[in-house]
Image (cartoon, coloured by chain):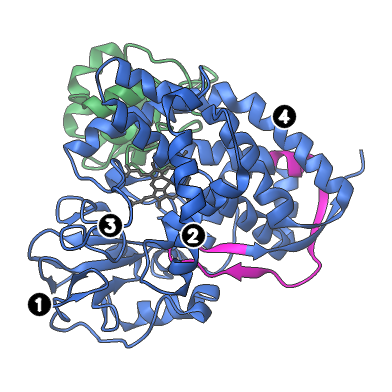
Chain colours: A blue, B green
Amino acid sequence: MGLIEGHLDVGAPEGVPIWDIDPYATDVLENPIEFYREMRAKGPFVYIPRYAILACARYAQTKEVFSDHERFVSSRGVGLVDFKQTTPWRPPSIILEVDPPEHTRVRRIMAKTLSPKVMREQASLLQSIADQMVAEVVAMGEIDGVADLAERYPTTVFPRILGLKKSNGRHLLDYGAMVFDAVGPDNEIRRASLSKGEDVVPWIMKQCERDNLIEGGLGAGIYTYADSGDISEKEAGLLVRSLLSAGVDTTVTGIGSLLYCLAENPEQFELLKDNPKLARSAFEEVLRYTAPVHSFFRTSAGDTEVSGIKIQENTKILCMLGAANRDEDHWPNADKYDVTRDVQGHLGMGAGIHGCVGQNLARAEVSAVLTAILAQVDKIEFTGTAKWRPGNSIRALASLPIKLTKKEA
Amino acid sequence: MVNIRITNTNGTEQSIESKAGMSLMEALRGANIDGIVAECGGSMSCATCHVVVDTDWLTATGEISDMEDDMLDCTATDRDPGSRLSCQIELSEALDGLQISIPDNQF
Ligand code: HEM
Ligand code: FES
């Protein structure tokens, strides 16, 4: 058996349609909704020969494969590369790319680090910075929603909450892009992101060191578990690295996509203004509707079966979270952004034991921004065409020209 | 059917009938009980499905895993001796009459 993109080519299972498409082609990544629909229509799984992978796009199978950590492991990488066959581009994450029992040991520490209690303590800081930043963009009127708010807010608050002594928003954004683009094939997107590594990686690794973290921040808090012997000093550094990897690009994307949804659906924005309590579930619906993390892989640990399809050991399976979130069989009117929907069960934050451990922070950040918007903004309108940035696992906006109209006092 | 008696955050009481086999979180959300957020859908990733079980009923709700135990240490409303994550409790006939209260905050 040969290697394709760093994993074994096990061939197409019986009864699975073969679809010669590139899910990482720029036009697909920029406009994936039709592609999602087509993939769901083909069946519970398709085989994509160019990368020798299975892919699932319907809700039921995507959820099953993504959340069953015993049959479908993360320790062999959540990207195309199988860590059992090929050395990954960086030492694997000790939370995202491990299985139990190792996973459980570190996950407990991260869950405490990013808990609702911790977010409650940060709430007033998050809100005051959001209020101020939204006031600034409202005063500007016409803005690029991505550069002027979506990127600015997390790169301002996240380093503070983490307690980084030195911050560099550009490096944080570039590192996030590297991590998320590395999940995909060796294409132009991945090469472009990884090429920034020379400057960015050493800087990131430096900020993860104990001496570069401020007492009382979340990063220094992780090192207290090294002091108590629950993890090693090196593991503490890798956990801080996990926060820097997964904590910025994701929330930047979340805020950008929220602004997009509000501009695209003015009647939903009106509903929210009348009912600001819906802010949190409005963001959940953004996660469903736009899926900032559009897809990740699992690897089958043994021969198994899903929905009658026999899946061989060593199979890389692309789980299309963005497509599952638009499955009409699970979500009535799936292509409608609807803040009143019961959105629980969406896969935007994953599912199962690897379900996003930073979700409480993400929600705290984005709902602070939305709360500020609902208090200060009367109207959000497109002033040009929004541009999506093709990413191998993140679906984010590159630019979002919008106009914000100030609410009369 | 499993009868669950609930004290809401505002002190009012109500009771709901649920099916055995589902989680307590699913039963509470199905009945639109205020104050159960449960954003992660039962993956034990959010700790926003926190309930306080009457201590007489605590044993009947089953074991608390190490992960749940850690998460209960840092819920938005401070932990109470009867605290549980409702997504981790499976309803059975043995829980018929279960008495719980909803904490003030989930986030
Ligand atoms: C809108 C924002 C976010 C989205 C859409 C998102 C999405 C996800 C998804 C889909 C997973 C599951 C990966 C898998 O199962 O393979 C995940 C895991 C993870 N996320 Fe997030 N995330 C967000 C924000 C954050 C933030 C703010 C942090 C950190 C502060 C973070 C840290 C992590 C970590 C460490 C994991 C791995 C958890 C594990 O494997 O147990 N995320 N995230
Ligand atoms: S529903 Fe998220 S922890 Fe229970």
Ligand 1 lies under 8 Å from the Cβ of mark 2: yes
Kindly report the distance in space between the C-alpha atoms of the residues bearing marks 4 and 3: 41 Å
The residue mark sitting in front, 3 or 1, is: 3
- Check residue A291 in the rendering and tell me which mark sits there, or answer none: 2
- The residue most toward the right is A408
Sooner in the amino-acid sequence: mark 2 or mark 1: 1
Mark 2: give few (<14), some (14-19) or many (20+) Cα within 10 Å. many
- Residue position for label 1: A1
Tell me the kind of residue under disc 1. Answer: Met
Tell me the kind of residue under disc 4. Answer: Ser
- Residue position for label 3: A88
Are discs 2 and 1 located on one and the same chain?
Answer: yes
Find out whether the residues at labels 4 and 2 contact each other: C-beta distance under 8 Å.
Answer: no
- Check residue A128 in the rendering and tell me which mark sits there, or answer none: 4
Q: Which residues are magenta?
A: A371-397
Q: Residue A241: image x %, image y %?
A: 41, 39
- Check residue B52 in the rendering and tell me which mark sits there, or answer none: none
